Amino acid sequence: MASRPDGDVWNIVDNDKDSQHYGRNFKFDFSYISSKEIKDVVKDYVWQNYRVGNKTIGTLYANLMYFKFFEVFAKARGIKTLKSLSNTDIDNYVSYLRTCLTSRNKPLKYNSQKAALDCLKNIVRWCQIHRPNDVPATEIFTGNEYIGVNRKLKIDFIPDDVVAQINEALKKEENPYLKYGIIILQSTGMRIGDFLKLRIDCIKPHLISGYTIEWVQHKGRKNKAPMPVRSECVAAIEKLIEITAELRDEADEKDKDTLMIWRVPKGRGTGSVSVITAQTFSQDWFRDFIKRNNIKDANGDYYNLTSHQFRRTLGTDMLSKGTNINVIQQVLGHSDPSVTKRFYADVKDKERAEVFKSVGVIGNINQIQSSAFDNVSEFEWFKANKDKCVAGLCDGYCTKPVTDGNICPRLLKRQKCYTCSRYITTPEYLEAHKQHLANLEKQLEEGAIYGEHYAEHFIPTIEVLKVIIERLEGLQNGN
């Protein structure tokens, strides 16, 4: 293996044939790092991880992009060496990331903030093993910088009603790449990077009946074992092969057998034939598809569709039908079934989805509408007695605490009625909800030694509380 390149600009070609970026030239530019000491550390981190294959070139390149945030912060603070960093510096860096704006003058997304901190954390962790004299001897990361109520809150699988809207919209979709691409993603659950590198010979006849599909799982650097596939998926791939047949003679040699090629209509490379990018397919086209077909979630907002949700939905559907977790693991290509169980296979419980849907959140209790009640007389009673209805609840209102002269037993027993359709809360109780969430998470953490059964008592309430907090914060912020 050659020695570390000289200069501040390195051009490294990805020669890994199993990589999504095979043949791509990555230009690493370290010139923006002002401190010579920090620059040397970052260069060493990139080169050594590339040399031994710990990280792919694409991952290292993305890391270097995120490190730019730390460079701006360090330069402003006069930080010239990683060894001088303290926990206070990390806290200040997190605060700085929260104020950062993108090139479009929008706040830096939460996931991007986390990625920027993780980049710095990865470099420091690597140095602790390989260059311990260049980083602090004491721990500077708490591990709690990006967890808690700010986590992205969502049901990971695509709800059935949204799936139905998507499939109905596909019937009239005019973009064949998007139409047939979504069918393939729904059928296979493959990652977007693998899908965009799918080969035209991926379909093979099954030895007994039907067909199987094979593809390269770039993340694990191995070929996917042949998987039985539905006839709709086979038909979708055949359609794409037919559509792209005339383009193959113009494509680069490495892309001639790639399924998802097109003629670039505008921007960089206009008129050339190349592989469709993830940005185009899963961001631009998905966004337009959702808005064009008015596909909305339970709250009436445009559904935030991502390519990875098809993968999670497939795993969820399989588990809900009683499929063994090890079979789901093989289908999704996970190295360990615990990954499948923890992140992908969540029983599609309609009651759970309905809980999120029916959480009562309103900006002003005086603006409550009659639709929240069974009849007009109940509505009139609540308007006259709403100031009394908070009795027994420390963080909201009960719209029907008394039935036939009897106080609701649930209200008497729990006094925390988050999942009841009669429960309503407002922004004035936001801090109370946050405090309750913090207390529950602390109990969950301290009670971890008691196992999953102990956790089951807390997790449902924690999930609902996070949704309540997110919506109340949205109301406060005018969203």
Image (cartoon, rainbow, N blue to C red):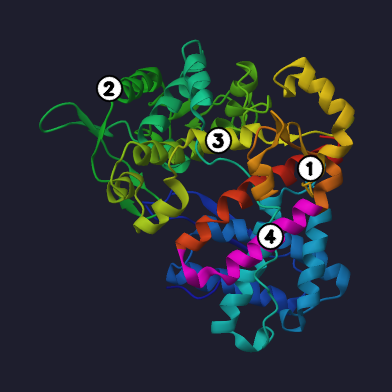
For label 4, the residue is 116
Dividing the picture into quarters, in which one does residue 288 lie? top right
Check residue 133 for magenta coloring: no
3D distance between C-alphas at marks 1 and 4: 38 Å
3D distance between C-alphas at marks 2 and 4: 43 Å
Is residue 242 placed above or below 287 in the rendered structure? above
Q: Position of residue 280 (x, y in %)?
A: 58, 32
Give the camera-side residue of 86 and 257.
86
For label 1, the residue is 396
For label 3, the residue is 353
Magenta-drawn stretch, dominant element (helix, strand or loop): helix
Q: Position of residue 474 (x, y in %)?
A: 79, 39
The boundaries of the magenta stretch are 432-451
Q: Residues within 10 Å of mark 2 (few under 14, many from 20)?
A: few
Q: Residue furthest left?
A: 208
At x 55%, y 69%, the residue is: 447
Is residue 49 placed above or below 85 in the rendered structure? above
3D distance between C-alphas at marks 3 and 4: 32 Å
Is residue 4 placed above or below 254 in the rendered structure? below
Say which label, 3 or 2, has the lower sequence index: 2
Give the camera-side residue of 472 and 345.
472
Q: Residues within 10 Å of mark 1 (few under 14, many from 20)?
A: many
The local secondary structure at tag 2 comes to helix
